[in-house]
């Protein structure tokens, strides 16, 4: 059995280490071995766990992208296997086009592209756009896999 091409929020939550309101992605739109595209409107939810008294600030878009990367890794894992434990080690060249995201209408489109990697780390490029295609955030992120720190964090 192959991994599904699309997923809803419940299926996404079952494949990443985030649950409840911390699962920020609502739909898997498309994916392949090199890229993933997800959508969500959780940035508008009053119970978003990343929301502060100042609202939902744009640096949190990195977390949206990181969850897409985690989902991508889970979809690439061999059928029936446990996805590799990992953590976001760095985010570089991050550019934010807005201060807040809780006031943005419509769904966010979260894209991540695997640029390179091996069994220890993966380099992704990511971008997040609004429903009209306006770029809200972009950057690169390194995900470190199979380390004792990652294993202890997920224990």
Image (cartoon, helix red, strand yellow):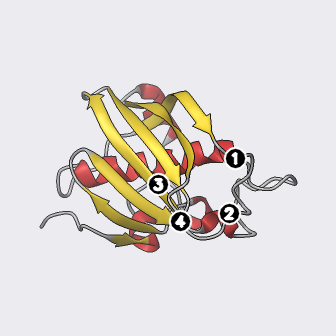
Q: Residues within 10 Å of mark 1 (few under 14, many from 20)?
A: few
**Mark number for residue 110?**
3
Q: Residues within 10 Å of mark 4 (few under 14, many from 20)?
A: some
Q: Earlier in the sequence, mark 2 or mark 3?
A: 2
**Could you say which is closer to the camera, residue 50 or residue 102?**
102
The residue located at (23%, 49%) in the rendering is 77
**Mark number for residue 131?**
4
Separation of disc 1 and disc 4 at Cα?
15 Å
Tell whether label 1 touches label 2 (CB within 8 Å).
Answer: yes
Q: Earlier in the sequence, mark 3 or mark 1?
A: 1
Q: Position of residue 81 (x, y in %)?
A: 22, 51
The residue located at (53%, 64%) in the rendering is 132
Q: Is residue 146 left or right of residue 101?
A: left
Q: Nearer the viewer, mark 4 or mark 3?
A: 4
Residue 131 vertical position relative to residue 52 in the rendered view, above or below: below
Separation of disc 4 and disc 3 at Cα?
11 Å
Separation of disc 2 and disc 1 at Cα?
10 Å
Q: Position of residue 61 (x, y in %)?
A: 59, 47
Residue located beneath label 1 in the image: 98
| Disc 2 secondary structure class | loop
Tell whether label 1 touches label 3 (CB within 8 Å).
Answer: no
**Could you say which is closer to the camera, residue 86 or residue 70?**
70
Separation of disc 2 and disc 3 at Cα?
14 Å
Residue 85 vertical position relative to residue 140 in the rendered view, above or below: below
Residue 131 vertical position relative to residue 110 in the rendered view, above or below: below
Q: Residues within 10 Å of mark 3 (few under 14, many from 20)?
A: many
Q: Earlier in the sequence, mark 2 or mark 1?
A: 1
Tell whether label 3 touches label 2 (CB within 8 Å).
Answer: no
Separation of disc 3 and disc 1 at Cα?
15 Å
The residue located at (39%, 27%) in the rendering is 147
Q: Is residue 119 left or right of residue 102?
A: left
Q: Earlier in the sequence, mark 4 or mark 3?
A: 3
């Amino acid at each position: 059995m192959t991994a599904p091409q699309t997923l809803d929020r419940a299926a996404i939550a079952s494949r990443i280490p985030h649950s409840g309101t911390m699962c920020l992605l609502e739909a898997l739109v498309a994916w392949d071995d090199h890229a993933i595209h997800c959508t969500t409107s959780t940035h508008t939810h009053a119970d978003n766990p990343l929301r502060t008294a100042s609202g939902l600030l744009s640096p949190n878009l990195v977390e949206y992208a990181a969850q897409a990367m985690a989902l991508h890794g889970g979809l690439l894992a061999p059928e029936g296997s446990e996805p590799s434990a990992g953590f976001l080690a760095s985010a570089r060249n991050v550019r934010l086009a807005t201060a807040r995201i809780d006031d943005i209408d419509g769904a966010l489109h979260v894209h991540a592209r695997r640029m390179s990697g091996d069994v220890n780390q993966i380099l992704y490029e990511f971008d997040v756009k609004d429903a009209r295609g306006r770029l809200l955030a972009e950057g690169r992120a390194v995900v470190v896999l199979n380390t004792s720190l990652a294993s202890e964090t997920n224990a």
